[in-house]
């Protein structure tokens, strides 16, 4: 069963213009051992900060959340 990854929230909120991607955003069972890469790009000049990012993981109607 494939697993889909997305970002559900960030605390504090990410700056406007932030781009978040997963590569790949959907994992098939054959890809579970290699995983997915989370990329976060913030606009130039964004001050350093610590962000708690909540990742939504869904598969077959089951949804889990993971904070990174």
Image: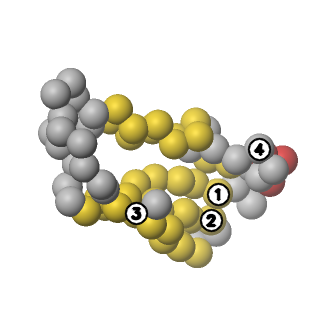
Assess whether mark 2 and mark 3 are in contact (beta carbons under 8 angstroms).
Answer: no
Q: Which mark is residue 3?
A: 1
- Residue at the image position 31 percent from the left and 56 percent from the top: 51
- The tally of labels here is 4
- Mark 4 and mark 1 lie on one chain; the one further toward the N terminus is 1
Viewer-proximal residue among 1 and 11: 11
Above/below status of 43 relative to 34: above
Q: Nearer the viewer, mark 4 or mark 1?
A: 4
- Mark 3 and mark 2 lie on one chain; the one further toward the N terminus is 3
Distance from Cα at disc 3 to Cα at disc 2:
17 Å
Local secondary structure at mark 1? strand
- Residue at the image position 25 percent from the left and 49 percent from the top: 49
On the image, numbered disc 4 is attached to which residue? Answer: 34
Viewer-proximal residue among 14 and 56: 14
Q: Nearer the viewer, mark 3 or mark 1?
A: 3
Which corner quadrant of the image does residue 4 belong to? bottom right
On the image, numbered disc 2 is attached to which residue? Answer: 59
Q: Nearer the viewer, mark 4 or mark 2?
A: 4
- Mark 3 and mark 1 lie on one chain; the one further toward the N terminus is 1
On the image, numbered disc 3 is attached to which residue? Answer: 54
- Residue at the image position 56 percent from the left and 65 percent from the top: 58
- Mark 4 and mark 3 lie on one chain; the one further toward the N terminus is 4
Above/below status of 47 relative to 30: above
Disc 3 packing (10 Å; few <14; some 14–19; many ≥20): some
Distance from Cα at disc 4 to Cα at disc 3:
21 Å
Distance from Cα at disc 4 to Cα at disc 2:
17 Å
Local secondary structure at mark 2? strand
């Amino acid at each position: 069963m494939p697993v889909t990854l997305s970002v559900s929230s960030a605390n504090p909120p990410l700056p406007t213009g932030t781009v978040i991607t997963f590569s790949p955003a959907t994992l098939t069972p054959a890809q579970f051992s290699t995983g997915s890469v989370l990329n976060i790009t913030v606009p130039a000049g964004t001050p350093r900060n610590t962000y708690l990012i909540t990742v939504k993981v869904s598969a077959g109607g089951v949804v889990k959340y993971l904070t990174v």
